Amino acid sequence: MEQASRPPRIGDVALQAGVSVATVSRALSAPEKLRDETRRKVLAAVEALGYTPNSVARQLRGGSSQLVLVVVPRRSNPPFFSEVLHGIDVTLADAGYVLITGYMEGVDRDLRLIELAASGNLAGLLTTSGMLPEVSGRSILDAGLPAVAICADPLVPGLPAVLLDDEAAARAQVDHLIGLGHRRIFYVTGPTGNYNETVRHRGIVAGIEAAGLGPEALTQYAGNYQFTGGVAGARAYLEMADRPTGVICGNDECAVAFMKSVTAAGLAVPRDLSVVGFDGIEFADYCEPTLTTIAQPRFALGAAGARLLIDILAGKTPAALQGGGKLVMQGHLRVGDSTGAPRG
Amino acid sequence: MEQASRPPRIGDVALQAGVSVATVSRALSAPEKLRDETRRKVLAAVEALGYTPNSVARQLRGGSSQLVLVVVPRRSNPPFFSEVLHGIDVTLADAGYVLITGYMEGVDRDLRLIELAASGNLAGLLTTSGMLPEVSGRSILDAGLPAVAICADPLVPGLPAVLLDDEAAARAQVDHLIGLGHRRIFYVTGPTGNYNETVRHRGIVAGIEAAGLGPEALTQYAGNYQFTGGVAGARAYLEMADRPTGVICGNDECAVAFMKSVTAAGLAVPRDLSVVGFDGIEFADYCEPTLTTIAQPRFALGAAGARLLIDILAGKTPAALQGGGKLVMQGHLRVGDSTGAPRG
DNA sequence: GTGAAAGCGCTAACAT
DNA sequence: ATGTTAGCGCTTTCAC
């Protein structure tokens, strides 16, 4: 019968190799300090026993963790965020870190994340939420972990961030529609108070002003960056007596649902109205019609944020940060078949 | 200037409360063993200092970790998997565990996952991949961690699994098309060798046989569960001289891309062909036409798998496992507008 | 170049 | 009911 023997410890390796535990430790972390022969002997024993250092003990002794927590709002739409996460994951893994994904999902979960951060087994913190976990005055940043914000800026002094130029991107949405000849715009917003929504809203208003149009050119509907918001927005749109011909949606999911709903009601895109999305998820290329949208450098945003954190953890002052703590990337307008000149 | 003081340790709390460290420890882990007054005193000190136990030290001492690794194949489509992950995450978090997501993405990453499992800071393992990380004969299961498979079965003896009844679901796809009057089927498969693909293929073949049709009724195209596979599959389909009127796609992404491609070529769904997807992602309800698909209980699959692992970690032999290690859930056909009777 | 030994912060015996 | 103390497995001085 196979004996379920406990995993080998450093002492087992030392015994097998006929050296001290200190030598085994050095063979693994500072090989150059050993004679070739000794090192070989130790490594052979390691191999023979299938030894892997216990990272918990190592961490308790050395104080340094390999775990990075990524804080994500629960309803960040998966197709967008998964690619940001991919960039984070690949970058962290290359540097030897391990990723923990912590979803914000109500007070209880937030508290657990705060405690996780305070419990001393994290190396650093990444956040994609504009609203950080904070429960009864206690913030996740209180633990003093090195942290970097990605995609959304919690606007905490001293917190570096990797961000999209949301304002410019939103401006590009408006400019595109106005350039096509649209004169009135229907805007299905993101959640009120949301960082991205706030900044993009500025861009949209600025675009309308720059075109010499008054505020009456903009009709807003409060959405939620979800399919349901697109459906509800479309319902509101359909009820309007005199419908704007240009429609801007907070994100691609919203835009797709909006198009589906107005099409079902007998309107045609882009004949009767033009629709612009935001994010550039893959799906935007496979809906009907193909969506005009803002393509975000999703992978790059995640990768840059992770890289920044890694540099900070390594004690390097990242060159990218000289501009005052924010690294800004640009989105670009990807024109599909959902936008065109208005009729007549 | 704010002094970046080190986080409080158990000794600091003891000092502040005027008790021993053991008492502080007990106040936190076994409060019933203390006098009310003592406990109150300690908790007040904990509060005052903002103390959170160092989980690394706790773990080194107690031997038990709170970390669960979920192994995910990189290209598991995000809209499907994120919901499975949600079920896992919520369930684990409720039980006090923390989730680490490990993407399989080539040999290097796989090796890191194997080492992570061997490094002693994991409580257990969840996998959604039919192909477990295995590098030069070393498997991630060698560490002997309690493990549960979800959605895909690596077919390792003794490994419990929570699975969809893929065969029955695939059978339902075929039966639906045949019930509508289709007599020939075009099937865009998943990746060759993939667990789900293998089982579903069986269901499809069985369905065709049961309908009294010969193998010539089934035309296959090797897909990949991605948009690109749907596009390529459609291209192959369009080149056929005598096209089947029933189309089954390996998953929803594939089906959406397939529909988009054949529509662009001038065919109409479901007039010229009927298309059935698999998974039941939200998006299937917002493409054009709304997709007929197999709705998987995604959240429940993840939650059940996590629950199983939690029970195993707690030493309970889960009742759900009496059927021999596999817990099987059913998908159901969700009829949309992409299927109908064939013309003529 | 290598070994002996002191902790990292905590929990669980074992004393009292 | 509370205090004292021995480790958990490792890294890292400090000796030799």
Image (cartoon, coloured by chain):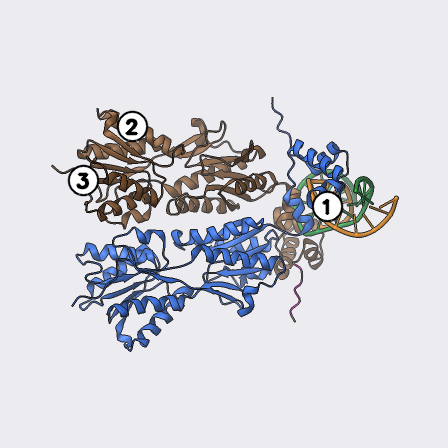
Chain colours: A blue, B brown, C green, D orange
In this rendering, would B187 be left or right of A319? Answer: left
> How far apart in space, not on screen, are marks 2 and 3 (Cα)?
21 Å
* Chain to which mark 1 belongs: A
Magenta region, residue range: B2-6
Residue at image mark 1:
A32
In which quadrant will I find the C terminus of chain A? Answer: bottom left
Instruction: State the mark number for residue B105.
Output: none
Q: Amino acid at mark 1?
A: Glu
Residue at image mark 2:
B205
Q: Position of residue B155 (x, y in %)?
A: 46, 29
Give the label, 3 or 1, closer to the camera.
Answer: 1
> How far apart in space, not on screen, are marks 3 and 1 (Cα)?
71 Å
Residue A71 to residue C1: above or below: below
Q: Amino acid at mark 2?
A: Val
Can the viewer see residue B36 in this picture? yes
Residue B7 to residue B296: above or below: below
Instruction: State the mark number for residue B340.
Output: 3
> How far apart in space, not on screen, are marks 2 and 1 (Cα)?
61 Å
Identified at 40% across, 59% down, the residue is: A296
Q: Closer to the camera, A47 or B145?
A: A47
In this rendering, would A121 be left or right of B316? Answer: right
In which quadrant will I find the N terminus of chain A? Answer: top right
Q: Amino acid at mark 3?
A: Gly
Q: Are marks 2 and 3 on the same chain?
A: yes
